[in-house]
Image (spheres, rainbow, N blue to C red):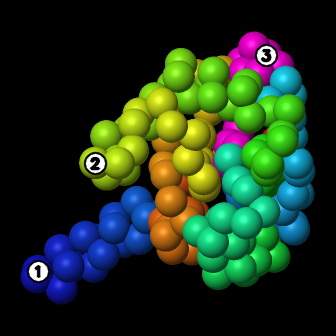
Amino acid sequence: MKKILLSCITMLLMAGCSPSYPRDTSTARLRQLSMDEVNEMIENDETFMFVFTQETCSSCLYFKENVLFYYIQDHGFDFNEVVLDMGSDDFQKAADFVAEHPNPEQFLTSDLLPTDVLTPSFYFIEEGEVMEIYIGGDLSVDEFDQLIQKYQLDKIEE
């Protein structure tokens, strides 16, 4: 009886851990977007993710080299990046966006404000609404995958 119960629990756990939708296993698309394009996608009630980065941001580079490089090989989704390097036309628009969608307190230290434009900052948008913000490049491949699955960003459209 115990073996049957243990087997049932194990099967339920395994079923609960696997995604409930068909996942795209092609190579991800890496897209550099402007804030105008991000705002248009939001206005169109799209579901997507984007990240603020900078070319010289060590946390951004760490994420790209240690997570994204491996993840994109067989996870078809759009990795949308808004690069905010010095003199970027998008910086003020990014600042306006962050003012409207403040940084979550759990990511802030005493020297940071909720309205600071931080990199990398990941925004998960569902049907045009900011649902989740993650700040920092310390995501593991598994943590990043959980976020992709949560919003079904790699779902095969039928």
Q: Which mark is residue 147?
A: none
Mark 3 or 2: the one toward you: 2
Report, in whole angstroms, how far the alpha carbon at label 3 lies from the one at label 2: 36 Å
Which residue lies under the disc numbered 3?
A: 44
Q: Does the CB distance between marks 3 and 1 fall below 8 Å? A: no
Residue 130: percent from left, percent from top: 55, 28
Disc 2 residue type?
Ser
Left or right of 53? Residue 83 is: right
Residue at point 74% right, 34% down? 91
Which residue lies under the disc numbered 1?
A: 1
Residue 112: percent from left, percent from top: 39, 44
Left or right of 108? Residue 27 is: right
Q: Does the CB distance between marks 3 and 2 fall below 8 Å? A: no
Disc 3 residue type?
Asn
Q: Earlier in the sequence, mark 3 or mark 2?
A: 3
Q: Is residue 102 above or below residue 132?
A: above
Residue at point 84% right, 40% down? 88
Which residue lies under the disc numbered 2?
A: 110
Residue 54: percent from left, percent from top: 73, 56
Q: Which residues are magenta?
A: 39-51
Disc 1 on helix, strand or loop?
loop
Q: Nearer the viewer, residue 157 or 90?
A: 90
Q: Is residue 156 above or below residue 128?
A: below
Mark 3 or 1: the one toward you: 3
Q: Nearer the viewer, residue 64 or 86?
A: 86
Disc 1 residue type?
Met
Of the 4 image quadrants, the one containing the C terminus is top right
Disc 3 on helix, strand or loop?
loop
Report, in whole angstroms, how far the alpha carbon at label 1 lies from the one at label 2: 55 Å
